[in-house]
Image (cartoon, rainbow, N blue to C red):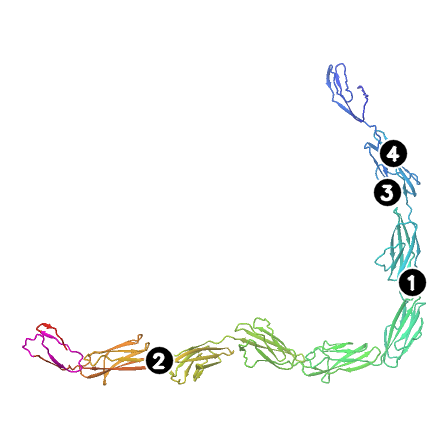
Amino acid sequence: MAPTYGYTGVVGAEGSYVLSVRTVETTTTSTVIVDELGGTTTESTGPTTRYSAIESATYVLDTTAPVVTVTGPTTAAYTGWNASVTDASAVTRDCTLDGPGGPGPSFTCNTNPIQPLLTTDGNYTLTVLATDAAGHTASTTSEPFLYDGTPPGVTFITEPTGPSRSTTVTWEWTSDEAGTTSCTLSGPGLPSAQTCGDGSYTATLSESGTYALTVVLSDAAGNEGTATSVGYELDLVGPQLTVTPAGDTTGTADTVTWAIDVDAGATLSCTLSTGGTPACTDGGTVDATLTADGSVSLTVIATDGLGNESSTTVTYTRDTAVDLVVAGPSGPSSNRTPSWTFTAEPLVSVSCALEADGNPVSTPAGSTCTATGFTAGELPTSAGTSYVLVVTVQDVAGNTDVVRSDPYLLDTTAATLTLTPAVGQDPVDNSTTPSWTFTGDTWSSPTCLLTVTGDGTALGGTCTPTGFTAPVLTGPSGTEYTLTVTVVDSAGNSASASATYLLDTSAPAVAVSSPVHPRNDTTPTFAFTFEQGVASVTCALTSGASTFTGTCSPNLGAGTGTFTADVLAPTAGTTYTLTVTVTDAAGNASSASATYLLDTTAPAVAVSTPVHPRNDTTPTFAFTFEQGVASVTCVLTSGATTYAGTCSPDLGAGTGTFTADQLGLTAGTTYTLTVTVVDSAGNTSSASATYLLDTTAPGVSVSSPTHARNDTTPTFAFTFEQGVASVTCVLTSGATTYAGTCS
């Protein structure tokens, strides 16, 4: 068995101490050396062969007792105690309860809150004993806690019972201590708010029944005292009242008797509508007498002991005849399923029959005959038939009657309607506000629909019983519109009619061609063309403010025409204007114009004579004329003989020459050149000039001076024919010419 060793040491201050030990094995002995507490360990080795591991143990020196704190409830409500211990080494707590109720049953002490069961009112203290691990103990006793476990007392001092008609009810109570009060009212019709006052509660009730108030009082300790009132019976219901026969009754008797039954203890009052307050009792009767057809009512009021009332009114109608009124449909009408209404007292049987033009006819299938009216099935379509309804009735009093209605005239003839365009307006027109008039039967409010054909767009307009006027149409030329009009006559028969209207605002084409001009033609003819199929063509020839007549010849089918003026006054330089106006079927008009210049002024021309008489056989004439003429002709004559030559006019310059071909040498012959000019208007002018051909030599003689003289400046004398154009003198000798003075 291994040896056992111990160690005893002395420790100083509080703290933790550690003892460390290990063994050493030798062959002979084993030595253990232990350091002092808090010092170092040294080993003395001998003949040691093996060492063990070091083992340690801790010792804690604790000389301080734990501190215990106990706190009790801070309010009157019992919540238990809380204990705390400052020494963390404390491991156990023991609790002792001291109070009037004794220790009571066991309770847990080591967890908070410490809450032993208290059963008796009074002061209690709790003592807590704490023991730490070192065995030190400490205890603390709490402050006394006054335990209150008794509920407060609540006692009603005002407690309504009823039965009563009072809808405002107050309950009052007292309590033996202060606290918080809550109230709960039970019953069939509770107010929306239930708030307790200080010892009282008032409620406003609305429904009959039994109500009870429960009051709960909570004291400061949380104890609740409860009190519930006796039931309060609210009675707002009148006594049960029965009058027989009840409600409205009808009969043929003069006298009616009503029996009355009411709850016991109720008082009764009776009033007749005919006047008077007959005596009435429970189980009794009241009589009323009528001397003529009419009604009498009895009003009975029953009042119970609380003042609640019940009332009823019953009526008796004496009826010895059926008072039936039959109201028929208005006519004439196209309605083949007309209805009649009946006004009458309640009926027990009704039968209906029809007469047509005074003869009974079968009632159409589908007809209905009731106490309130008759609706016919489809009547035959024969127009002009007068129907009378024969009604046979019996009322609840057993009275019968037969009533015939006023005649009802069936009119199924369709209405007539004709649409006529406004005067001057064709189905094709240029008016942007076309209109139509309506003719036919009499009607009150037609319906009109103007649309773009094929489009369906409604355009509005003014629709009256006599006609329709379109709004301003804004569609392009060539747009077609459709007007549909529906009318209903006084009998309900309808008719519809439609008309189309083509808006044409495109003016027809026209062109006028001027005659060739200026001309001197006083009956000029103009040509013109226009769009085929126009309605009319007019021609107007004017000059300034004057109008001139002529013949206007249009061919409407071909679209061509001419205008020939009557003889115009030959006033040179006058310009005439022809205006041609064409109008198509829609009323669109176009005009075109052309002018004509009348020129009757002959052009100017002048011919200059060559120097003559001469012996020139190819004389040249010069002439001038008005520039821009159409033609120039030259004719050279002598007597009846015409001579050729070259005529060279310059039309642009207005000048020209004529050179004659070789003339015959017939001395003394006079030639005449006539120049004729024609302008573009056809006006002609002529001018002439003459030329005298002279081929006879003039006479001349020369007188020699006395010669054989030595005069070196001899003078010759000569004579010649007077009027010669020139005289020349030539003095020669052989081939030599000599100068001198020729005078």
Q: Position of residue 313 (x, y in %)?
A: 87, 72
The residue singled out by tag 3 in the image is 74
Type of the residue with mark 4: Ser
Q: Secondary structure at mark 3?
A: loop
Q: Tell me which label, 2 or 3, sits earlier in the chain.
A: 3
Q: Tell me which label, 3 or 4, sits earlier in the chain.
A: 3
Task: Name the front one of labels 3 and 4.
Answer: 3
The residue singled out by tag 4 in the image is 139
Q: Tell me which label, 2 or 4, sits earlier in the chain.
A: 4
Q: Which mark is on residue 681?
A: 2
The residue singled out by tag 1 in the image is 164
Q: Tell me which label, 1 or 2, sits earlier in the chain.
A: 1
Q: Position of residue 681 (x, y in %)?
A: 35, 80
Task: Name the front one of labels 4 and 1.
Answer: 4
Residue range highlighted in magenta: 706-732
Type of the residue with mark 1: Ser
Task: Name the front one of labels 1 and 2.
Answer: 2
Q: Tell me which label, 3 or 1, sits earlier in the chain.
A: 3
